[in-house]
Every structure is written in C-alpha cells, then in structure tokens.
Amino acid sequence: MGRDGFRTALPDRLTYAYDATGPTSLPEAVALPRDADQVAQVLRVAHRCGVPVTPRGAGSNLSGGSITDGGLVLGLARLNRILKVDPGERRAVVQPGVANLDLQEAVRLHGLMFAPDPASHRVSTLGGNAAENAGGPHCLRYGVTAQHVLAAEVVLADGQALRLSRDDPCDLLGLCLGSEGTLAVFTELTVRLVPQPRHLATLLAAFAHLDDAATAVARTVAAGVLPEAMELMDGVAVGIVEEVMAAGFPATADAVLLIELGAADRRELPLEQVMAICREAGAAQVVAEEEAARREALWAGRRSAYACFGKASPAVVIQDVTVPRDRLPEMIQRVRRAGERHGITVPILAHAGDGNLHPNLLYDPTDTGGVQRMHAVEEEIVAACLALGGTITGEHGVGTHKREALRRQLAPAVLTAMGRLKQAFDPAGRLNPGKLLPDGEEQVTDASVQGPAGALARALARAAEGGEPVRVGILPELAALDAVREVSAGNLTAVVEAGVSLARLDRELDSLFFPFRGARESATVGELLARGESEPACYRYGAVADAVLGLEVATADGRVLRLGGAVMKDVAGYALSRAFLGSRGTLGVITAATLRLWPRAGAMRWMEILPADLAQAAELMEELRAGEDPDRLELTWDTAQVRLLLGFEGSAESVRRRGEEARGRLERRGMAVQPAGEEPQAWRRLVDALEQRWGGVCRRPLDLSLAELAVWGARAGSQVALLGHPGGFVGLYPPGERRNAPPPEPARRLKAAFDPRGILNPHLGVGRW
Amino acid sequence: MVDQERCARCGFCLSVCPSYAATDLERHAPRGRLFLLREARAGRLASAQLAEPLDTCLRCGRCREVCPLDLAVDKAVLDRLERPADPLWRLLPGPGTRLPGGLVRGAARLTGAIPPGMPPGGARRLLEGVVRRPSGKARWRVGYFPGCVHEYLLPRAALATVRVLVAAGAAVEVLPWGCCGLPARSAGHREVARRLARANLASLPSGLDALITDCASCAAALLEYPELLPEERHSAGKMVALVRELSAFLTEAGALPPTRIGRKVTYHQPCHLEAAWRASPRQLLDAAALFREAPGAERCCGGAGTYFLRQPAISRRILEEKLGGLAAVGAEVVATNCPSCALQLARGVRRAGLPFAVTSVSEVLAEVYG
Ligand SMILES: Cc1cc2nc3c(=O)[nH]c(=O)nc-3n(C[C@H](O)[C@H](O)[C@H](O)COP(=O)(O)OP(=O)(O)OC[C@H]3O[C@@H](n4cnc5c(N)ncnc54)[C@H](O)[C@@H]3O)c2cc1C
Ligand code: SF4
Ligand code: SF4
C-alpha cells in the first residue's frame, strides 16, 4: 500500500481522531486502501497482530462510531468509484467510499434516485449509510438504507472476503446493515434505485397548535397517502430559523409541516386532498407549490435549520429518537418540558410520518453548568422515549454515545444474544471494539416467561437437553400461539402470534391491511416469516422482513427474546431479528411479531397477459413501469407458458383509470388482456403444482436482471421464476437441486451459538451443517 | 479571525474541497485543517507539522459556501500565514506600482506558465492611459482594471474586454492602478497588500458608473478592501459598490450579445467568482455561442496563483480531474474569466494534447459585439 496509504505522522493521526460527534481519540495509524484486496490485506495483518480496526467512511456520524480506541483507522474514502449504473434494472454497484450525493447525481440523468437521503448526503458515504442504516425524509415512503441494499461484498475481521445477498439461507447481509462496522467491512454494495416521481408538489402548513399538526400527519397516513416526505418543525425551531434567515415562516406557528407529494402522473397527486386534511386539522396557513424553484423555496427553511441552530448557539447536539407514530406529539411535549426545566433551548425537527424526531440541544461547551444541563435534557429525552415505547436511536446509531443507554432499552437476554452475534462474525473482537454494545457480561436474570411462548421455549430446552431433533413447523405448542395481541390504528401496527393464519389476520384487520400472503393459502404468520416469503406484494411493499418491526423468538436454550419494538425506524443494537426471519426455524422459533400495517386500499384490480417469451415480457414490463406504474407485477413461467399478471391498487378512480390505460397500451401492442379476478391464485397454483411434481419446492431469490433472467430461463428447463420486486426474482427449485455449498462461517457459528445441539430443523438450511 | 473551536466537524466541506478530492487525506480537508490549527494553538502540534496541511490549501473558499456555520477555512489559513513583510516584498511593489513586469514574465517563462505564442511585451504599453469611447453617445462611464496577469501575460483578453465594453456603449478608462494586492496577501504579507490597496483607492477617478474587472480573483480582492482597510472603510465601501465582473456588468446593464457564433463553447467557473455573478458568464456565452455546461464546471483548476508551482503534484491531479470534465462536453473553446485559471487550463490542455482552446469570456464576446 505504500507510505501514502499507511500513515503514522501526527497530523494524520490527529485528523482521523474525530467524527461529527465531539469526543476525539488518537489512532495509532491510518490505513487508506485503494481496493477490496488491500482492505482484506489490512484486516489480515491487523488480525494477526491483534490490532483493533475501526472502519471509517466520511466520519460524519453522530454517535462516535468511527473514532478508534487506540487502534487502526481503516479509511474507505479511496474506494470511491461508481462501478455500474444499470437504469434498466434500477440498480447500481458502488464502492463504499462513494458519497451519497455523488450517486444521486450519477443516476439523476436516468430519472432515478437512491432513496435514502440523510441530511449529510453531500459528504456521508454509502458504506457509512449502510453501516449506520441511515435514514432521511424520503424513508417515510421508500424505507431506510437497509431496504435499498440488495447485495454486498464484505471483508470479515480476519480478512476473509464474502459476498452476501438476500440469497443466503440466513440473512447475514441484513445483520451487517446497521452494524456500525463491528461485524464486517463493506467493500462493494449493490443498491436499489427508484424512479424519481415525475410530478412533485410541496405543501407547507403552519399550525398554531402542535397537536393539530400531528392530527394532520395521522390523517394523511390514514388516508393511504404516502408522501415523499413529511417533515415537522416545532415552534422553537421555526422561531430560530426565522430569526437567522427570515425563511418566511409565520413566526407564531407552534408547528410547521412540510409535505412533499410525488406521483408518476400529475392526476395521481393528492394535493387537494392533503391540503384539505391540513385545513380541517386546523392549519392557520397552507401554501402549495409545484414549480421546482418555488418548491425549493418552501424547503429552504427546513434545509437550513441545522445551520441556523449552529449559528444561533456556540454548540449543538443533535439527538435522535423514535416513538410509535401516534406518540409523537406527546414526545415533543415531553422534550419541551425537559428543555424548559433545565434552561436549554431545544428546537425539534421530526420525520413526522415515521415518529422519528431530532431534538437539537443548544448549549455552550465552555459553560460547565450548561453542559451538565444539556446532559440532563439528553437523559430525560432517552427516558421519555423509552416510556412511550420508543427506541433510543432511529437513525444515528449507538456508537459510543448511547452504549450505556442501550441497557435501558434491551433486556439482558437480548444483549447477550447480540453479543453472540458479534462473536459469530468477529470471535477475536477486533472490528470496531467498544461500539454498539455496552461493555461487560450481562446478568441474565429473566424469570421464566409465562404463556404459550414460554411453554414453547421450555419445550425447546427439554428437547435440547435430550438432543432430540425438532421439526419447527409441526411443533404442537405453536397451535396455542393463536392470538392477535394488539392492533394499533394510530401507529398502523399489529402484534400477532405465530400461529395466527394470514387469512384470519386479514379478516381481523378490518380497515387496515397486511399485504403479504404466503405461498400456501393456509399459511400462518410464523410460517410466512420463517420462510421469508415476500412475493408478490413486495413489488410495492418491499420484503416482508422490512414489515416486521418487532419479533418474539424462542431459542433452543429455553429463552424468549423480544427484539425490536413498534417503531418505524430503530437502529438500537443489531438487527438481530434478521437472523430469524427467513432462516426457516433453524436458529429459533418465531412466536410472535409486531407487523407494520397499511391502510386498506379502496380498490384492487388484476389483469393477465401471455407474452410470447421472456424478452417480450421484459419489454412490456418496462413500458408499464414507466407508464401506468402497476402496484403488482408478477412474471411466472415454466417451459410451457410465460404469464404476466398486473395489479392496480389505490382509490377506485385511480385503479379504474390506470387499469384502462394499461389495457389500451397492451392491446395496442397486440396483447389479449384478461381480467384476473380479485386476488389471483396463479402463482399459488404454480407453487402447488410444482410441489406436487417435485415433492416440495425450494425458493431462493435470484440476483438476476431481466435480461439475464431471459437467458437463464431459456436454459433452466422446468424451473420457474416469480417476479418479486423491481430488484429481484425468486427462483423455484426442486428440493434436490438445493445448493450444496456450506453456508459461510458466520452463519455456521450463529447456528452453533443459538442452537449448539443442532436440534432445530436439522434437515433445513444452516441446520444441515 | 475564524474560530476553529466552533467547527462541528460535520464534514460537509469535504465534498467541495479540491485538495481533499485530490488526495483523500483529512489533513488536506478544511475540517482537518481547522482541527490541526486548533491542536497547534493548544500546543499539541508543532508549527513545522502544520505547514504542509496549510500550504496545500488553494484558498478557493469553496468550503465556506457549504459550511453550515459559515466558517472560512481559507481565511483561517491566511490568518495563520500572516507574517511581517520581509525586505524583498517591501522593495518590490512600491505603492502604486504593479508587480514588476519583467519579473512576472521571466518567472512565467521559466516555469512554463506562459503558453507559447504570447506577445513578447506585456499589455502595459498597449493599455496604459487608454480611454476609449463608443461612436455614439456613451451610456456609461466605466473604469477598467485589467489586473497584473492580464497586463503582462494575457493582453489579448484585456483588449477584448475594452472592445466589448465600448461596443456595448461604455466609455472606458483603463485605471492607473497597481496590483490588487492578492498575491501579497496570499503570501502572508498583509501590510504590503494594505499599501497597495490604499494607493489604488487614492487614485480612483471620480464619477465612474462602474468599476469593471474581468479577473475573478482581482474582483474578490477588491471586494475585500473594506475589511483590509478598516480605517478607510467608507471610501472602500463606495468603491466596492462600483465593482462588477465584466459579464455581470453586461447582463445587469441589459447589453446582451447581438448575434451568435456557431462555435461550441463551455465555461470554467473560477473559484473566486462571487456567487452572485456566476450565472452571468453562462448566460452571455449561451447567447453568444453554442454553449454547454461541463460537468464540474465549478470545480477548481488547481492553478491558484503560484500553487501550481508550490504543490505541483496536487495541482496536477486537480487539473486532470478538471480537464476530464471539460473534455466530456466536446467543446471547441473553454472560456473563463480569471487569467490565472486560463493559464493553468492552457498548460493542461497543451500537456495532454486536448482538442480545445482556452480563452477569456471577453474574447468570445468580442467576436459578436461590435
Ligand atoms: C449535520 C449532519 C446531519 C446528519 N443527518 C443525518 C440524517 O438525516 N440521517 C441519518 O441517518 N444520519 C445523519 N447524519 C449522521 C451520518 O451522516 C450518518 O450516520 C452517515 O451514514 C455516516 O456516514 P459516514 O460515511 O460519514 O460514515 P462514518 O461516520 O465514517 O462511519 C459511521 C459508521 O459506519 C462504519 N463504517 C463506515 N464505512 C464502513 C464500511 N465501508 N464498512 C463497514 N463499516 C463502515 C464506521 O465504523 C462507523 O461505525 C448526519 C450527520 C451530520 C453531521
Ligand atoms: S463544514 Fe464547517 S463546521 Fe462542518 S466540518 Fe467543515 S468547517 Fe467544520
Ligand atoms: S479554501 Fe479550498 S482548498 Fe482550502 S480548505 Fe477550503 S475548499 Fe479546501
């Protein structure tokens, strides 16, 4: 790597001693590799010498994540090439040091965008975004960074390189996302791109009462409108911005909402509707703009808010907590009271639709009393968000800043389980030590859990003692887990036990909606989640795992782990539930889940066409995507027939209009368009048929583009693919053709850690090794 | 004084800093420089170790534009460089004089700063005392300040500016001014810069409608006179109100190009060009020729006065990046409004054998005005 790439001079050590958090710590040396091989080399050598390594992107994180503890900084800034932009398949392959904004600019020309848009997008790197699972205003509609990473090349602590994708029997990729550089170093990312909405409208609504703004947010979400962004500024923030830059906000407002609406078709823009909702909720002033420069002018105050706080105060701490969506107003009031109590000014910015808020604490670092009071407010913010069922960090991460606070959110058993996850990836503890988890052993003192989940856990413990294999799918204890524990219309969530069938759940949800259906008609929630079946709803709703906000799991050692919670954004600790979602019961038994719900759409309409071959299907899909933008696209084929199903979902008017336009378009292309009923069973029938033919079906996502798929399909003979979402397909295989490569080492170590006797589903996935 | 303690270390400035882009080293980033300044002030870093990180700053000022706290790292670096005028600087530019022409030209030739084909003498003789009037009644009376580099090294550009202004209807007087003071200031000789500024202010003719310059760096230096000469803040302020970059003057006055030539032109935006004036050259070029914006048009060229001599490696990397963007639009002409940038770009074009010419905005405009 040479002297330029390995630096030990004091000015270099000093300039890698900080990130955007505040505290500093001098590293021993700084390594700046130029490619993945050099990254692996650095990690190998460091591993041999026992030197701790801290990966670093742009050092813009706000939780102390890229500061070392005396070891080596592994700077990834020089891996900054965009390797490929594939507009057709809507994805890009990038090195981790590419700045978020640079990717945005590279794909903008193609009418696409990378949805995660942290306020630090100009500097923060995609590797840093992935490692922090960063969010931004757009995440309300499109989801956080983890939902936009399709595959990754990583290097483990010992220098071993691995390719991870949704392909794996155990979602190692999902575990690494948000792991703050403690599990693996990203050296390449394949990310999803989404089309920029062609029509945008920005709406600014000023409210005299914060609660009215919150009502407007809730009603907008309940109406099934998914804005591109829905940002809230409280009165204190508005006042400061007005004072510093005269942005034109009504200075008396107690809250200002900025709502951006987007659609591919101007007629789909629910502008009038949302304006009416704001007015009815009591907005004192509502302005809307569609022209780009004027929209930008409405955003100016919000975009400059941080700069205004910075100018108004000697120093600013940006806090980051998330509460269930309907608790946001109460949380804001509590923050205000805490600020008032301690004499600290706390302007608040919030990603309102997600319940994620950033109280900005203004203080003077040279005034020790002031610093103490600032810390007191921080402390109260953490306490308040936990009391309201929230999480101590929604997007900025735990780092060093919130390690201790994590103990107050997560049970000792969960922290212990997370410690095992860390060990499975990095047994020697070399990668970014001292971050994300608190120090020391946890005292696990959980009393035995009551109810059916506890009973199930105890049954597993007994089986483990005797070394008896357990077939998770037919565990008798699952039948007792049949309660829909809670449905929250305000937060749009439900807590559901694993044995509840999806059909029953759908009936009980009433005006709410859980879009995932499972391949078997009789599937239960537990089965759906353990198999990780996202098709076909994922085309519109993303992977089913992303709709799981919280998970309850019984493990082979007789414990019940409660992971996550009921909030839309949560980066407190590892995304451990990813280990259990899709791993088919091999690591633990899912007993209940907190599911994200959507308002039930007014109408749904399906139609079916039979393209001549895959190439034609691909062409038609591209056209439809750019035109009527269907909400479901399912491509199925076997040797005999290619079949394309499209579904339209939304208001009755939108469904009718887009359906008719799509029919016209397809008929002009010479296709016969058949209506396909309410909820087509075509792909279920296909799965059934294949199960009968093969005596079972293996499914795994294919990391293939449409063009590649056409080639693959021509070769694959009897195999079948279902279109999942724009970024991927699912291949169905006869069980015998399951890949025989052993799972990667971390997956095997995870299995050993969570199920040391190997009793859980020994015939499946990682269970077989 | 820039308060380095205030830096939030958010890193936003990393995204625009040319020296950081060239090396990907935090010591060459604005945030790193501020941190090192802080450490030096606290006695944790020796001055000798501070020199390289500060000398590699191009003082382009881009960091300030994105900094949420408006911290001007270029100024912080300058403040640190501040030192009493050494004898050599005291001797050379006496009050009211330009940088010594022979020295500038000699040094420029030696270092390859001047592209071949440059007229042997400077424009000093050509421009000195020049007063030009339009054929009809003059709409404005303007003073023109060509600046040292135009006078000595790129007189064609200066003459083109005079022609354009006259064609647009202005009576033009070339100001009897010396150096704007920027080179002295950049070398840390604030006192010399102050002397030059004071002399210039004293010899400003009265009754001007505008003070035109076609050098973005000179313009930036003039705009800083009130800060440089606090005791003459009032008269400096009045002068500042008159200063216009050539293109900005023309667009503001509504004197747009009367016709269009068929050449493909692109634009390099000098770092020192005032934000308010950045649209004007593009607007004029778009009206005067087939204009296309180059990717990274706003990025530094790496010239930065004598930077290309002091930091050849970094300067070259910045220049290569820059030329890549300019070449991407397939233009025949790259126009800019800073002679120091023009020289740097011309050097790069020559070295890489690229198929386009570098000229001043005024030379493109001179083809269509008049
Ligand atoms: C003003 C300001 C506004 C911000 N706004 C937002 C916001 O809106 N939303 C938001 O989510 N965040 C925001 N942030 C926080 C920060 O920008 C994000 O956390 C960002 O993702 C960090 O990226 P980075 O490249 O700077 O990474 P760094 O800060 O360098 O590192 C962050 C973490 O990722 C690890 N890491 C970095 N690169 C890799 C890699 N290649 N492989 C493995 N691990 C790696 C590091 O070890 C560290 O733990 C903001 C920060 C600032 C200063
Ligand atoms: S942008 Fe400003 S505050 Fe942020 S790191 Fe750079 S100099 Fe510091
Ligand atoms: S003035 Fe230019 S080179 Fe110097 S730190 Fe700022 S952006 Fe970098």
Image (cartoon, coloured by chain):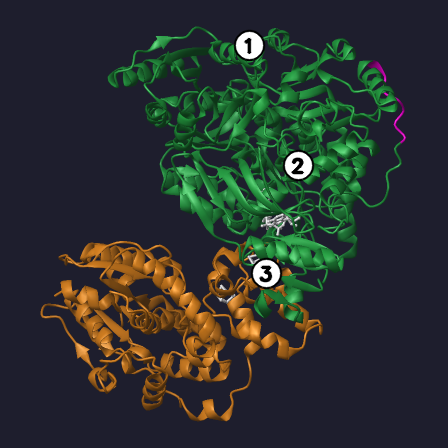
Apparent side of residue A269 relative to residue B362 in the rendered image (left or right): right
Q: In the displayed image of the protein, which residue is found farthest to the left? A: B135
Q: Secondary structure at mark 2?
A: helix
Give the chain letter at badge 3. Answer: A
Neighbourhood count class around disc 2 (C-alpha, 10 Å): few under 14, some 14–19, many 20 upward: many
Which amino acid, by three-letter code, is at mark 1?
Answer: Gln
Give the chain letter at badge 1. Answer: A
Mark positioned earlier in the residue sequence (3 or 1): 3
Q: Name the residue nearer the viewer: A62 or A528.
A: A528
Residue on which disc 3 sits: A32
Does the stretch in magenta take in A450? Answer: yes
Mark positioned earlier in the residue sequence (2 or 1): 2
Residue on which disc 2 sits: A175
**Both labels 3 and 2 in a single chain:** yes
Residue depth check, mark 2 versus mark 1: number of the one nearer the observer: 1
**Both labels 3 and 1 in a single chain:** yes
Check mark 3 vs ligand 1: CB closer than 8 Å? yes or no. Answer: no
**Quadrant of residue B25 in the image?**
bottom right
Task: Tell me the magenta residue range.
Answer: A445-451
Residue B325 spot, x, y in % from top left: 35, 58
Which amino acid, by three-letter code, is at mark 2?
Answer: Leu
Q: Magenta stretch mostly in which secondary structure?
A: loop
Residue on which disc 1 sits: A692
Q: Name the residue nearer the viewer: A509 or B368.
A: A509
The C terminus of chain B sits in image quarter: bottom left
Q: Secondary structure at mark 3?
A: loop
Q: Name the residue nearer the viewer: A515 or B92.
A: A515
A99, above or below B86, in the image: above
